[in-house]
Amino acid sequence: MADTTFWTGSDEYLCDPELAQAFHMARTLGMPLLIEGEPGTGKTELPLQYAKELNLELFVYPVGSKSNVEQFVAKFDHVKYLRDSQIEVLNAQREEKGMESKLSTSGRTTDNLNDYILSGPAAKAYSSHNSVLLIDEIDKAPREFPNDLLYALSHRKFVLPESGKVIEVSEENMPAIVITSNREQELPTAFKGRCIYHYIQFPEPDVMAQIVNKHYPKADEEIVKVAIDVFYHLRRLGLERAPSTRELLNWLKYIRTFAKEEALEKINNLAGIGALIKTQTDLEKVQRKLFSNSEDFGKRSNFN
């Protein structure tokens, strides 16, 4: 029986009430949860932290431009099947010659095609009750990939290649499936219709402070406050790629290696800016703003 408790996060993950509600609904109905939002807003961390907190088996499929259902579900090992077929022929010939020793196929037999099925994360998750399956960044996949998943999501079953074996799971035992998207491309309407949908809004500064505290509970409050102020100033500049939560956490991890006064100075001077800014155009824009006034970056009243 799949876990349907109302999970509200952990010591390491802040799960806002709306996201917690959507996640609970998806698990209760045996449907995938599709999460969209900016990169670095914690979409991927949700299933990882949920599985860790409840000690559940976790299966992850990182989606790429060449992803296909065969990789995701299962594929037939034709090479191993051909090699074992040749071994069986050789063993038959050896037996005819009275030779007792046989070549090994490690217990496989070509009469059982299931011996040659290489299960992917989907087949493993469907076979493991109360597990967690993460399909990460599905918007990177070819257009046909989400369409090819419609049958499996609707009927809760996969038909394995060559052998025709069916892996089926009930609504009650459906794994907790989380699908993330950065919206690099729009997903098919029919695919979205098979999911519970949630969009993660970028957190406000007070919520960001709580997120930082989850990761760095012993961090100096003033350092965190000043760093967050600078971070949101950067986000209001209209950059090509605004810095994300993940990047703020990386920057703070670096800043915290210095004593307090030196850390505050480095924040105001944007030391380690490469953790926050990821394009040349954005870097030049920030540098122009940084050097347009002799006052410290983090203290400027005109930096809005």
Image: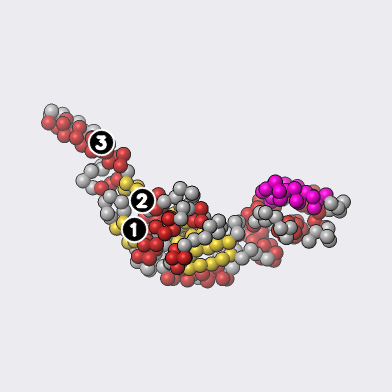
Q: Quadrant of residue 98?
A: top left
Residue denoted by label 1: 158
Query: Residue, x 23% and y 47% (percent of image)?
Result: 112
**Mark drawn on residue 74:** 2
Q: Is residue 44 magenta?
A: no
Residue density around tag 3, few if under 14, some if 14–19, many if 20 or more, within 10 Å: few
- For the point 66% across and 51% down, the residue is 250
Give amino acid for label 1. Answer: Phe
First in sequence: mark 1 or mark 2? 2
Residue lying at 80% horizontally and 56% vertically, measured from the top left: 298
Front residue of 265 and 5: 265
**Apparent side of residue 98 relative to residue 288 in the rendered image (left or right):** left
3 or 1: tag closer to the N-terminus = 3
Going by the numbered disc 2, the residue's amino acid type is Ala
Residue 136 locus on image (x, y percent): 50, 55
Q: Is residue 17 left or right of residue 171?
A: right
Q: Return the residue at label 3.
A: 104
What's the magenta region? 270-291
Estimate the x, y position of residue 165 in percent, counting from the top left. 28, 55
Residue 106 found in image quarter: top left
Report helix, strand or loop for mark 1. Answer: strand
- Distance CA(mark 3)–CA(mark 2): 25 Å
